[in-house]
Structure formats: structure tokens, C-alpha cells
Image: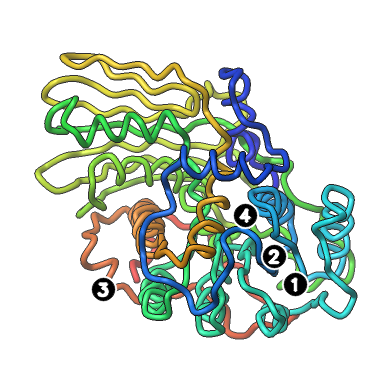
Amino acid sequence: MKGETKGKTGIISHIIGQNKGIAKTTLLSRRDFIKVSSLAGMATLLGGSGRIFAAGSDKIRVGLIGCGNRGVYDTVNCLNSSPGVELVAMGDLFKDHLDKALAKLKQKLPEKVKVTKDACFVGFDAYKKVLACDIDLVMLTETPHFRPEHFKAAIEAGKHVFMEKPVAVDPVGVRSIIATSELADRKGLTVVAGTQMRRIAHIVEIMKRIHNGDIGEIVGGQCCRMGSGLLNWGPLRQPGWSDMEWQIRNWYFYTWLSGDFIVEQHVHNLDIMNWAIGSHPIKCIGLGGRQVRTGPKYGNIFDHFAVEYEYPNGVRVNYLGCQINGVSYRNDQRLAGTKGRAYIDFGNAIIEGQNPFKYDKPIPDPCIIQHADQITAIRQGKRLNEGRRIAESTLTTIMGRMSAYTGRSLSWDWVMNASKLDLRPPRYEFGKLRVRPVAIPGKTELI
């Protein structure tokens, strides 16, 4: 999202710097679309939707909810992923966000942006108005806090959904996402999450080998993402902005809106660990704090976390994350097995040991592939639902944050089934809103 220097868009720029054969984010021909979809092999076979599309020819009408930089980026990729996809409706909390996004989209893809003035909506209920439009697919790229409610409304309205990660900021929200995902299955609707690392070719290939036993039984791992302090992210508070408006416009620095950076950004990395091990963790213990993010501009999130996750069979993964400028940059995942070791980052996939491997082929743009997969599934009536998977990866990060905030060891079962932590504000309106205090391990209450 906005301000992420080596996050979502950084994934692609980093890969492009290392692989000359990468497919860039450009409009794909029908032949290229079929080729990319075939290469990805990711349009998982799951049940069909009610609407019938004629193999790649019928229009797929898209609505956008959340008109920040990420919303523009995802929408461009979605519209570019296949012929016959067009944007027809938009909604955001703020008119200036919507106007700016619409201007950018019309400039980039004027022939695919068919949004009229009557299909532009602003306010807390804008998402309902977008969903009431004649759309087939909705893009949920709003602040993470709102995703459970918007996802539920979208599926109830019979829309296919692409939703950015993370998909919640608390256990109550995660449980809602899982319930809505089950409803999507019953209604034959596709759900794709913005975990594009699941579609990066070299990571897909090494995962096949890990799951085939090339490094043997996994006995432990490490997940590290350090750097990018984001101290200059967000706007300055303007006269007339209420507490609610200020916090939402500066959402990254408030736990109730972003989930903290371990949730908002490092869900990518921990999702890879869950994927490799084939399970979510069953326990965790963590610590963290805030040394460089001081003052009211930085809300109440931390700037460093360290969490030990325990997976089934005694497998332990150490996660280390920080957002502090000037520290050494690292962004990688490592797994140790009984037959070898695996190393994964945004441009490399390496196995050392009895079955050595190093990926050296082109890496097509995963941010195009994720949308191509969904469009294929919609048109072919195939079942594709990533809702529960991204909900579990999101809870993995929330569980780590809760442990670090309180200093308490936590079990997955308790967090998933018993925690009553619900970060929703008393009401959704522009007015006064108290900022929760910065967490202090050992003192902050576990809820």
C-alpha cells in the first residue's frame, strides 16, 4: 500500500532487476492471456458462479472500493489481465481520493474505464452503493479494518471478490472472513487474495520441491524482514479534520485500521512459512516495541517485533521484523530439513543438500497472474476461493502481534475460538475518537 518501499509493488521491481524475461504490467492479448494463465496453473478447480460467460468474450464489469494508490495499482492490473474487463463503479470514504484515482485510471486505461459520475460514491456507505451497481467483480482495497464487513456485503450481494491482504485486524474479523468464505463457496463465487507471492514462479517451483520432500522433513525455519521505517508516510493533519478522519487518512499507524505492520505487510512472509510447512502455527510467543516511532503522528503501532511460532510436530519458526530506517535490509525466508535447506526471497529460490536446486527461468508478473486466474475462473465457472487460507495467514500475524503487545504466550485455538478482541470503534462517523495507548508487554491486557 501507499508508502511500502519494498512491499507489494517493490516485489515486482525487485524481480525485474534480476530477471530479464519478466512479463511487465502491460495489456495482454488474448493469446498472451491464455499463455499466462496456463503458465500459472493457478485457476484452481472449484464450483461455478450463477452468471455464464462466453469463454473470454463477455464483458466482466468491475467495481472498486478503496481508491488509494493500491486500489489504482490493483485495478490497472485487473483490467490489463484479460480482454473484456472494464471498470464501471468506484467508492471511497473521501472524494479527493476518488477523484485522484479516477483521473489516474482514465489516464492509464481510458478505453477500459467506463465510470460515470453517477457511479462514483463517497462516504461510509459508499461500498453498499458500489455493490448495488451492475458489477460482476469487486476489488476490496480499502483500509484493512473495513475488509470483513465489505467482504460479507459483497458475497451476500452475489459478487466475485478480489481482496487485498491482510483481510482483518483482529480475531473477530478473521472469524467473519472465514464464515463469509464458506458462504462464497455455497454461492459459487470466486475469492482471490492479494498474496501475489503465492504466484511468483520461482516460489511456486521451490514449494513443489519442498512439498515433494526434497529437503526432507522440515525441522525449523526463519523469517526475516527488516528495514523501511516509513517515517514520512501519510499526510499532515489538516485543520478541520476530526479524530476519525485524521486516523483513517493516516491509517497505517493505527492498529485498529492496519493491524500494525506485522499484519499489514509481513503477512506476505508468514504466509510463505505457512505454505511451506502446510499448516498454520499452533502456538507463539513474542515481544516488540517502539523506539523510533515517537509522537502522535505515528499513532500506536510498533516499529519492531520478534516472534517464535511453533508449528505441528515441534517445528519452530523465528520471525524477526522491523521498520526502522538505517538498519541493514533483509527480506527472506529459510527452512531447514532433514535432507537440506531452502532459501527464498523475491528473486531467488535455492535448495542446498541432497537435492540441490536453483531457479533460473523467467518470472512473469504475479500481480497480473492473480487477476488472470480469477478472470479465467469466473468465465469458466470454476471454483477458486482463497478466503480461508488468507484468513489463517492473517490470524498468524494477528496472533504474533497480540503476543508481542501483551508479552503472553498464546495458542492458536484460543486466539481463533475464544479471543474477544474487536477493534471496531463505537460508531462510524467523523468525530472524536480516542487513540488507544501504545501497548506495553507485560502490562497490556490480553483480550
Q: Secondary structure at mark 3?
A: helix
Q: Secondary structure at mark 2?
A: loop
Q: Position of residue 57 (x, y in %)?
A: 65, 61
Task: Compute the Cα span from label 3 to label 1.
Answer: 33 Å
Q: Residue at x 28, y 19 (%)?
A: 351
Numbered marks: total:
4
Residue bearing mark 2: 66
For the residues labelled 3 and 4, say whether their Cβ atoms are less than 8 Å apart: no
Residue bearing mark 3: 417
Q: Secondary structure at mark 4?
A: helix
Residue bearing mark 4: 253
For the residues labelled 3 and 1, say whether their Cβ atoms are less than 8 Å apart: no
Neighbor class of circle 3 (other Cα within 10 Å; few <14, some 14-19, many 20+) is: few
Q: Position of residue 386 (x, y in %)?
A: 41, 60
Q: Which mark is residue 91?
A: 1
Q: How is the image coloured?
A: rainbow
Instruction: Say if 426 sits above or below 282 in the image.
Output: below
Amino acid type, label 1? Gly
Q: Position of residue 131 (x, y in %)?
A: 66, 80
Rendered-image quadrant of the C terminus: bottom left
Q: Nearer the viewer, mark 3 or mark 2?
A: 2
Amino acid type, label 4? Phe
For the residue pair 94 and 289, the one nearer the viewer reads as: 94
